[in-house]
Image (cartoon, rainbow, N blue to C red):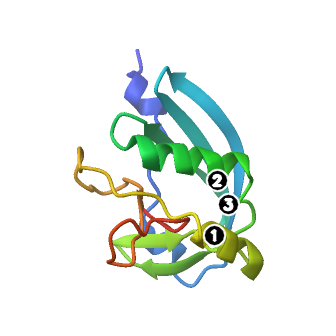
Amino acid sequence: SIPASHFAPKPLPLSCFVSMLVLLQIFSLTAVAVADFRVKFDVVTTAGERSFVVNVHEDWAPIGAARFKELVEAKFYDDIRFFRVIPSFMVQFGLSGDPAQNTEWRAKAIKDEPVKESNKPGYVTFAKTGAPNSRTTQLFI
């Protein structure tokens, strides 16, 4: 018999995103558990079409999870690009090509939350300016 882990999606190395045009499109927003949800992102790179899934644990950061869900449902992340890539470390995305949208969401910064889970490879977290309560739309993976 083949173990279930054999069928698990393989993570994409961050180096795959270097020097690539990357367009993000939300494919689905799926409930996983009462307080969790998943969002599938389809990406287009020079290496072809790929996808990745963000599994959101609302109990880790309820305010951030709610904002992320709000942005997904508003289709904010549709057709945006990774604009910062550091191979084997991280990628950053979350700026709209429409300056008015960026201005609108920047005015809706969300409060900081106590850290319940440390950042680990493959985790998603909101970017901050360094000032308190400055999370808006930008994310790091």
Tell me which residue sits at (52%, 68%) in the image.
138
Residue under label 1, please give it: 47
Q: In which quarter of the image is residue 111?
A: bottom left
The amino acid marked with disc number 2 is Leu
The disc label shown at residue 71, or none = 2
* As drawn, 126 above or below 67: below
Tell me which residue sits at (47%, 39%) in the image.
55
Q: Which of marks 3 and 2 is in front?
A: 2
The amino acid marked with disc number 3 is Tyr
Is the residue under label 2 in contact with that under label 1 (CB below 8 Å)?
no
Report how far apart the C-alphas of labels 1 and 3 lie in the structure: 21 Å
Tell me which residue sits at (73%, 71%) in the image.
101
Please indicate, yes or no, whether residue 10 appears anywhere in the rendered image.
no
* As drawn, 115 above or below 56: below
Q: Tell me if 14 is positioned left or right of 118 in this view.
A: right
- The quarter in which the N terminus is drawn is top left
Q: Tell me if 109 is positioned left or right of 24 in this view.
A: left
The disc label shown at residue 123, or none = none
The amino acid marked with disc number 1 is Ala
* As drawn, 3 above or below 129: above
